[in-house]
Every structure is written in structure tokens, then in C-alpha cells.
Amino acid sequence: MIIAQITDTHIKAGGRLAYRKVDSAKALRDGVDHLNRLLPRPDVVIMTGDLADIGRPSEYATFRRIVDRLAMPFFVIPGNHDERGAFRDAFADQAYLPRGGDFLHYAIEDYPIRLVGLDTTVPGEPFGRMCDARLAWLDDCLRRASDRPTLVFMHHPPFLTGIAHMDAQNCRNGEALGAVMARHPQVRQLTCGHVHRPMQLDWHGLTASIGPSPSHSVALDLRPDGPSAFVLEPPACRIFYETDDGNLVGHLSFIGTFDGPHPFFDASGALIE
């Protein structure tokens, strides 16, 4: 199975630029084209929050016009820039999203790897939270399919990254979440968004990662007083590939057109010197 991750698209409507600098709609269009061109194509795409920049209905309408061109199913969760009511309305046709309740959690059961999406958002706040109710939902969800290899995805990372202004708004109650995850060894990986940078670590016995943005990147500044800033690094997405031995390998896939591929060997099979 191949799973693509797109995160933190920050779509603006009407051709407006995010932060007066970033054409986030074009970046997402390029990302969709990139995923559709991949050989083999991903089976699904998970989109880990901050889909819209301010959470306006017009931004979600723009987002849908772009992602509906994907050649494979996609699954969305909200981030802190999303507005839950407008988000629900924008994806009302997506049967996997719950119609009621306080949180937009769900499990996708249709693939070799079970996909569990978590809603970590706290209305009006930049940080996220896994409260007792959300932890109980996740614990029960994982318990009901203990024999299924699982990928859990959420917006706010529950661990520190070293980028101080982003760590101040990560997922609260992360250690409690880690304790839940540790009880369920079928969880292969946890992947997040929010920080606009690719990274990974070993966390509570499993691999945890953050996906890059196809739009703009948070500056890699590890000073404790580093300012909140972004840079226009090469856009990218994450590709998870299930290997024949059952591992889930995360690849970084840069979005764009690059020179190559070029062969290592000539027509006779000799290494090109």
C-alpha cells in the first residue's frame, strides 16, 4: 500500500496570497498534479490539517476545486487554521467524517493499513489537545482492531521539535497520548502536520513524523528565542510505502520538475563512468 501525506496547504480564495507572499492555491495544484503523475500512484492521500488559511467557506470551496482532481481517494482532518463548522460543511459529502459529535475522529477500514484520523483542534487556540474524551475514543478504536496494522494521523505534533515558537503550540497532553499508543503495538507510525517541516523521531516505541508543506516551510531556527518566520524551500509531500516485509517506510517526495532520471548503467549493463 502507498499512502501520500499533504499538509498545511493554507488555501486562500480569490487568488489572494498567504501572508502576502505565498501562492498556496498554485502550490496545492502543483501537489495534486505531482501525486497524479507518480508511478505507481498512491492508493490514498491523507491531509493533515490547516487546509484553509482562515477557515472561510470560500477557502474550502477553492480547496475542493483543486483536490477533487486527485485520481485517488483523500481523507482530511482539521488543523488550528480550520474552522470546524465550515470544515464540516465543505466535506459534507465525505461519508467517513462523523456528522455529529464534538470531534472529527474516524477510522478507515478499507485498506491493508488501517487509517485513523484524530481531531486535535481547540477552537480559537493555536495549540491542540488530546483530552480524556479523545484519548478514550482512540483507545477504544485501536482496541477494536488490534490485529490490523495502523497509521494514526493528526495535525498538532505531541512532541517537541526544537523550534520553540511551534513547540509552544503543539498538542497538549502528549504523554498521555503516547501511553495510549504504547498499549497498541499494531500502530506502525504516527504522522502529523502543523510545523511545515519534515522530521521524524522514535516516540513511545513507534516512529513519529511530521510532513512537509507543499506551500511554505517554517524556518529551521533552533534558537530558544528564534522568531516566528517562514521560508520558501522546495515544496514536498510525504510518501509512506508498505514493504514486502511489512514495514512502513516514509519517503520525502519533492514537488516539481527536476533533471532526470538518468541511468547508472549503459545499454550493455556497464556502469557509466
Image (spheres, rainbow, N blue to C red):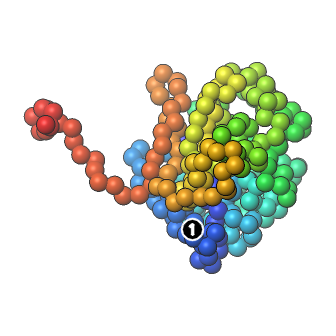
Q: Position of 12 compared to 72: left or right?
A: right
* Whether residue 5 is visible: no
**Residue that carries the numbered disc 1 in the rendered image:** 22
The answer to which quarter of the image holds residue 177 is: top right
Q: Tell me how many marks there are.
A: 1
Nearest the camera: 210 or 247?
A: 210
Q: Position of residue 169 (x, y in %)?
A: 76, 48
Residue positioned 49% across, 56% down in the render: 233
Q: Which image quarter holds the C terminus?
A: top left
Is residue 9 placed above or below 205 in the rendered structure?
A: below
Q: Which residue lies furthest to the left in this view?
A: 268
Q: Position of residue 181 (x, y in %)?
A: 74, 27
The answer to which quarter of the image holds residue 230 is: bottom right
Residue positioned 48% across, 62% down in the render: 30
Is residue 135 placed above or below 237 in the rendered structure?
A: above
At label 1, the amino acid type is Val
Callout 1: 10 Å neighbours few (<14), some, many (20+)? some
Residue positioned 73% across, 66% down in the render: 54
Nearest the camera: 232 or 202?
A: 232
Residue positioned 12% across, 32% down in the render: 270
Q: Is mark 1 on a helix, strand or loop?
A: loop
Q: Where is residue 131 in the image (x, y as percent from the top left)?
A: 87, 39
Is residue 87 placed above or below 272 in the rendered structure?
A: below
* Whether residue 263 is visible: yes
The answer to which quarter of the image holds residue 112 is: top right
Nearest the camera: 253 or 202?
A: 202
Q: Position of residue 243 (x, y in %)?
A: 47, 28
